[in-house]
Image (spheres, rainbow, N blue to C red):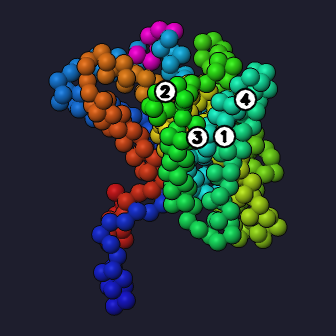
């Protein structure tokens, strides 16, 4: 009787965590998902009246067709790479840092103070001050939710998300008030940075790409081979175990969010002083949200993040070329990107979980 009641209460379909899959199985699933994404995207292209083979070829060639296109692809990749590395540290600890956007913005604001009001400093000293200020700005914005989480167990997802909007309004306040460009004839904007406050270029791209590559190695070593990296993993697995092992969980959370927010803050410096050359409300531009998808797709592996952020930047740059070549609307390019990402991200779900239908003994989907 009890068994009958139990079966009656069991939902028709439910998700169950998969047992460990082999690397070969995971690779097969990802290849299938990639193939399906291309087929689904191709159907969409056919429906709007274009040849999918030509459109896909344009996306690939668009990202590499010239030296300038390659530089633009790398330029798109830099903030994606760095902010993904930043959120990875928090995610390893199971701290859901959705606030990379806000941390990027605060890093840009803090560094912009030096770019706007101390542009007469020696170039190297000025850039050093801007990077330190950017790190501090991002760290403080990451530290706020970390403090409340460790002290009052608040929901960090909502907290970090809300801080994004506050940071955005701080830029609006500065742009319309104390930092408004006096030469803008009343138009609300912040002045362009002096050339002394702009990042230098290496091989035609601002040197942020070098910082990004160095950070990949540093974050990998930090997570894999340091005591602090080990503490992050233990806290992520179980706070109770971490406490039992004598770890100061609160200290680990605060310290990790300082670093996580700081890296995102440095991303803000690179965006404002290396790409925009001013402080604009679009300085983060959705990068912080895309970074979340990149970090998860890479299994929180820094070298995986390097590869996935490169593929994302190729897709974004190629889509913009496709849009201009075929005269497609922005929405069409976005829909195509969405279809491809839908299948690739969906694949990650089936790697970790499976559907189980209610049946005698349970039938797997």
Q: Can residue 231 be seen here? A: yes
Where, by quadrant of the figure, is residue 318 drawn? top left
Judging depth in this view, the residue of 46 and 278 nearest the camera is 278
Q: Which residues are magenta?
A: 62-67
Residue that protrudes farthest toward the bottom in the picture: 1
Chief SS of the magenta region: helix
Q: Are marks 1 and 2 in contact (CB under 8 Å)?
A: no
Question: Comparing marks 4 and 1, which lies closer to the viewer?
Answer: 4
Q: Are marks 3 and 4 in contact (CB under 8 Å)?
A: no
Question: Comparing marks 1 and 2, which lies closer to the viewer?
Answer: 2
Residue at the spot 80% in from the left edge and 46% down from the top edge = 226
- Please state if 198 lies on the left or on the right of 172 as rendered: right
Residue 66 lies in magenta, yes or no?
yes
Where, by quadrant of the figure, is residue 60 drawn? top left
Q: Is residue 355 above or below residue 325?
A: below
Residue 223: x %, y % from top left: 72, 45
**Residue for badge 3:** 178
**Residue for badge 2:** 184
Question: Comparing marks 4 and 2, which lies closer to the viewer?
Answer: 2
- Secondary element at image label 3: loop
Mark 2 → mark 3, Cα distance in angstroms: 13 Å
Ranked by sequence position, the earlier of labels 3 and 4 is 4
Mark 4 → mark 2, Cα distance in angstroms: 20 Å
Residue 110, which numbered label?
A: 1
């Amino acid at each position: 009787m009890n068994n009958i009641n139990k079966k009656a209460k069991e939902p028709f379909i439910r998700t169950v965590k998969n047992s460990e899959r082999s690397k070969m199985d995971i690779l097969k699933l990802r290849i299938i998902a990639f193939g399906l994404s291309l087929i689904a995207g191709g159907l969409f292209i056919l429906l709007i009246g274009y040849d999918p083979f030509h459109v896909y070829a344009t996306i690939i060639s668009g990202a590499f067709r010239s030296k300038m296109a390659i530089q633009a692809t790398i330029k798109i990749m830099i903030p994606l790479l760095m902010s993904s590395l930043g959120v990875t540290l928090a995610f390893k600890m199971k701290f859901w840092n959705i606030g990379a956007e806000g941390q990027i913005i605060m890093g840009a604001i803090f560094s912009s103070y030096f770019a706007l009001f101390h542009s007469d400093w020696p170039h190297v000293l000025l850039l050093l001050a801007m990077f330190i200020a950017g790190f501090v700005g991002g760290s403080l914005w990451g530290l706020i939710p970390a403090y409340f989480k460790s002290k009052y167990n608040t929901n960090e997802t909502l907290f970090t998300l809300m801080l994004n909007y506050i940071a955005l309004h701080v830029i609006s306040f500065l742009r319309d008030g104390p930092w408004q460009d006096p030469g803008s004839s009343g138009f609300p904007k912040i002045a362009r940075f002096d050339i002394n406050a702009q990042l230098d270029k290496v091989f035609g791209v601002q040197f942020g790409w070098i910082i990004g590559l160095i950070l990949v190695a540093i974050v990998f070593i930090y997570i894999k081979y340091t005591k602090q990296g080990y503490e992050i993993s233990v806290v992520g697995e179980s706070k109770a175990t971490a406490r039992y092992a004598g770890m100061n969980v609160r200290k680990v959370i605060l310290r990790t969010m300082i670093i996580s927010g700081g890296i995102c803050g440095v991303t803000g410096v690179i965006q404002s002083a290396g790409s925009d050359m001013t402080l604009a409300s679009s300085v983060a531009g959705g990068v912080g949200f895309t970074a979340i998808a990149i970090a998860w797709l890479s299994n929180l592996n820094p070298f995986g993040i390097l590869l996935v952020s490169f593929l994302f930047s190729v897709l974004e740059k190629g889509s913009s070329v496709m849009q201009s070549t075929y005269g497609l609307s922005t929405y069409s390019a976005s829909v195509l990107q969405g279809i491809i990402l839908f299948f690739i991200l969906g694949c990650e779900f089936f790697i970790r979980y499976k559907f189980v239908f209610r049946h005698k003994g349970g039938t797997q989907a």
